[in-house]
Amino acid sequence: MRTVIRLLTTASAALLLSACSAAPDQAPSETELDTPAGLELPAAGPVEEDMEAARSNAAAWCALVPSSLVASTLGMQLQPPTASYSAEEVHCTYPPVEDGGRTIQVQFRLAQDHERFLALREESDSSGLSTSDLPGLGDEAFYTSSEFGEVVAYTVTARQGSVVLTVGAPSPLEGVMELVRQVFGQLS
């Protein structure tokens, strides 16, 4: 049976042009939002002629985290991602290269702010996972860890402006943090 470990990456499709200078508790107004590198939000319920454009936009989000980036930061060899989406999320699923390997999922959540970030942390705490602060990563960040036999998986959730990434992997904490930093670097 294949072990499935999720690598969640959560990001907002709308970035503030002044995201680095915004206070953590400021939510962007709709007039302040911009999308990075020509990426657009997938439509909530696209009509049939817009389905291909929505699929293409989801694939563009997944392209921010190519399997080569996962390999260089986490040391995991994965196939290119398959994109899926909803009105609020884009999912990128990375199948393993070898049989018996781990499937990784990257998730971008859209239109996040400080309050939603706090809700994610409260959700982690209420599910029994103890969270710890990670200063120096984005505007605010925390991590959790969990054990699966001899494997320890770290999950990092970080916010930079209106972008929230959650990355979890059976890799050292430093590698997971580096993946988050590199994705943030592409969104700046």
Image: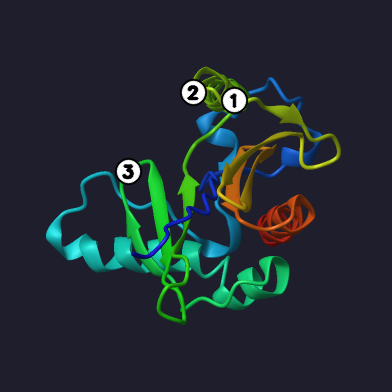
First-in-chain label (3 vs 2): 3
Q: Amino acid at mark 3?
A: Ala
Nearer the observer, disc 1 or disc 2? 2
Nearer the observer, disc 3 or disc 1? 1
Mark 3 → mark 1, Cα distance in angstroms: 22 Å
Q: Secondary structure at mark 2?
A: loop
Q: Amino acid at mark 2?
A: Ser
Give the crowd class for mark 2: few <14, some 14-19, many >=20 residues within 10 Å.
few
32 relative position to 84: left or right: right
Q: Out of 69 and 20, give the one closest to the viewer.
A: 69
Q: Looking at the image, which residue sits at the far front?
A: 149
Q: Residue at x 40, y 79 (%)?
A: 99
**Circles 3 and 1: CB distance less than 8 Å?**
no
Image coloring type: rainbow
Mark 1 → mark 2, Cα distance in angstroms: 10 Å
Q: Which residue is mark 2?
A: 127
171 relative position to 125: left or right: right
Q: Out of 77 and 135, give the one closest to the viewer.
A: 77
Mark 3 → mark 2, Cα distance in angstroms: 25 Å
Q: Which residue is mark 1?
A: 121
Q: Percent from the top left, x then y, of residue 185? A: 74, 59
Q: Percent from the top left, x then y, of residue 23? A: 76, 25
Q: Residue at x 79, y 35 (%)?
A: 134
Q: Which residue is mark 3?
A: 87
